[in-house]
Amino acid sequence: MKLLITGGAGFIGSHVVRRFVLNYPQYLIYNLDNLTYAGNLENIRDIEDAANYKFIKGDIADEAFIRNLFQENQFDAIIHLAAESHVDRSITNPLEFVKTNVLGTANLLNASRMLWRDGNDENNKHRFYHISTDEVYGSLGSTGHFTETTPYDPRSPYSASKASSDHLVRAYYHTFKLPVVISNCSNNYGAYQFPEKLIPLMIHNIKNNKPLPVYGKGENVRDWLWVNDHAAAIDTIFHKGVIGETYNIGGNNEWKNIDLVMYLCRLMDQKLNREPGTSAKLITFVKDRAGHDLRYAIDSSKLKRELNWEPSITFETGLELTVDWYLNNQEWLDEVTSGNYLKYYQNQYMNR
Ligand code: NAD
Ligand code: TYD
């Protein structure tokens, strides 16, 4: 099995790459990543010398590059995670999201169609697995859950670009019989998450006694899932998911932002031996995000019922593991927050 994983130097992708490299030594894993600001080879340093692993730097939106790469390597299957992923950045620079998330996905679909069109798939290996988000379903009121049949209603440039990519994936299934599968997951947290997202940003700022910017009144609700559990779900769906199907992945774990930040403050006070209440004083309510979705909540009962997946740990345990990881990996955080890691990679690749 020649398995291409895109975006494997990012947050979730690095956990997926590690899991597949270690658990499936019989597969050849190709990690294609353009090393944008969110890509960091430090995230997968521990497996970079594995015999079944190869890193490729490149842009999924580059049509000729992708076509040649597929012809050269004859991939059997793809797990596609590469994307621009931060809602706030999509408000500042929407076109970058359209380019990578829409055009990039279309390029990969097209290259897969060309490669697999002879229909020679005796071992039923071919599979285009697209990783998406619950944000495509839009925003909920105080009740209800997203299911796999909830109509799409994306409301940010990020979620609209992911919704577009999902539509393209389904179009290639129906039109060209491309063997696709899609999953839509809720908010992830865990080790190696770039500290622009809520949880690592708050951990970093609490540690450094900096203000904790809570958008609006902190009333927005997200469902949080430990990234290792997302990687386990991806493993399950890749191997057992039914072609043409969509699976929702969630933690059944809804938190109001302000409650989550307060909880983190209490946990960090303990970890840093601070007086209870010290970190919470850093909370600062700031201008709300434009078009801020109120609530996401996912119904992942299909995945539990059909493929027997469920989260392995509680949020409290996952959050403590995550806080410990960030406190024990200060060097990683310093390199990322200072931007040093970018210079290092630019030089490394220029010198090759
Ligand atoms: P991330 O931003 O941490 O990583 C994205 C990776 O893609 C980076 O390594 C980056 O270098 C790479 N990349 C970006 N543009 C590229 C391009 N044009 N060509 C090649 N590589 C490129 O993102 P993440 O949080 O790990 O998310 C991974 C996937 O999971 C995304 O598709 C995202 O939509 C989806 N997702 C994320 C979450 C979440 O909570 N983070 C939840 C559900 C779904
Ligand atoms: P984020 O981690 O950016 O994920 P998403 O927007 O994809 O859900 O944000 C999670 C929630 O936290 C979201 O409601 C926005 C809010 N938020 C803040 O209140 N302050 C912040 O500094 C950030 C980054 C997010």
Image (cartoon, rainbow, N blue to C red):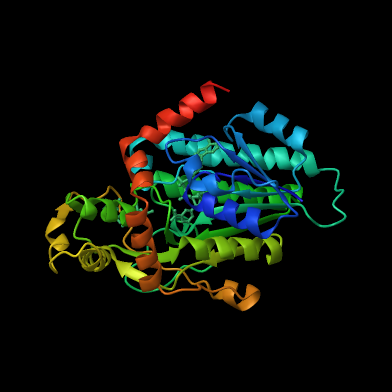
Instruction: Please state if 320 lies on the left or on the right of 266 as rendered.
Output: right
Instruction: Please state if 98 lies on the left or on the right of 90 as rendered.
Output: right
Q: How many marks?
A: 0
Quarter of the figure with residue 306: bottom right
Q: Position of residue 46 (x, y in %)?
A: 54, 48
Instruction: Please state if 16 lies on the left or on the right of 28 as rendered.
Output: left
Q: Position of residue 292 (x, y in %)?
A: 30, 53
User: Looking at this view, is 3 or 62 the one in front?
Assistant: 3
Rendered residue at 12%/62% (across/down): 278
In this rendering, the answer to whether 4 lies above or below 219 is above
Quarter of the figure with residue 223: bottom left
Q: Position of residue 81 (x, y in %)?
A: 55, 48
Rendered residue at 51%/34% (across/down): 99
Rendered residue at 73%/50% (across/down): 178
Q: Quadrant of the C terminus?
A: top right
User: Looking at this view, is 333 or 85 the one in front?
Assistant: 333
